[in-house]
Amino acid sequence: TNLKAFTVGGIDPMYLMVPRTLHTLSTMKATAISLMGRIYSSEFFKVSL
């Protein structure tokens, strides 16, 4: 029982944290890129107008 609790409480979250972190980072990167694109295009339109 203790070993199972340790596995569920200790190893699994550490193992699951890596893909979750990578997913979060890629999501943040995509969000940042789209935000930068939006800002850039709005600046571009301001300049061209």
Image (tube, rainbow, N blue to C red):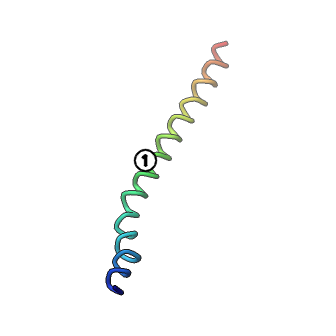
Residue at 37%, 74% (x, y): give it: 8
> What's the amino acid at mark 1?
Ser
Tell whether 5 sits left or right of 38.
Answer: left
Front-most of residues 25 and 9: 9
41 in relation to 19, above or below? above
Residue at 67%, 19% (x, y): give it: 46
| Viewport quadrant of the C terminus | top right
Q: Position of residue 7 (x, y in %)?
A: 34, 78
| Viewport quadrant of the N terminus | bottom left
Q: Position of residue 34 (x, y in %)?
A: 52, 34
Are there few (<14), some (14-19), or many (20+) residues within 10 Å of tag 1? few
Tell whether 41 sits left or right of 29.
Answer: right
Q: Position of residue 6 (x, y in %)?
A: 37, 81
Q: Given the current orientation, which residue lies at the most extreme bottom position?
A: 2
Residue at 47%, 40% (x, y): give it: 30
45 in relation to 5, above or below? above
Q: Position of residue 12 (x, y in %)?
A: 35, 70
The residue beneath circle 1 is 26
Quadrant of the rendered structure where residue 10 is?
Answer: bottom left
Tell whether 6 sits left or right of 45.
Answer: left
14 in relation to 30, above or below? below
Q: Given the current orientation, which residue lies at the most extreme top position?
A: 49
28 in relation to 15, above or below? above
Residue at 63%, 14% (x, y): give it: 48
Quadrant of the rendered structure where residue 20 is?
Answer: bottom left
Tell whether 19 sits left or right of 30.
Answer: left
Asked which secondary structure carries label 1, the reply is: helix
Q: How many marks?
A: 1
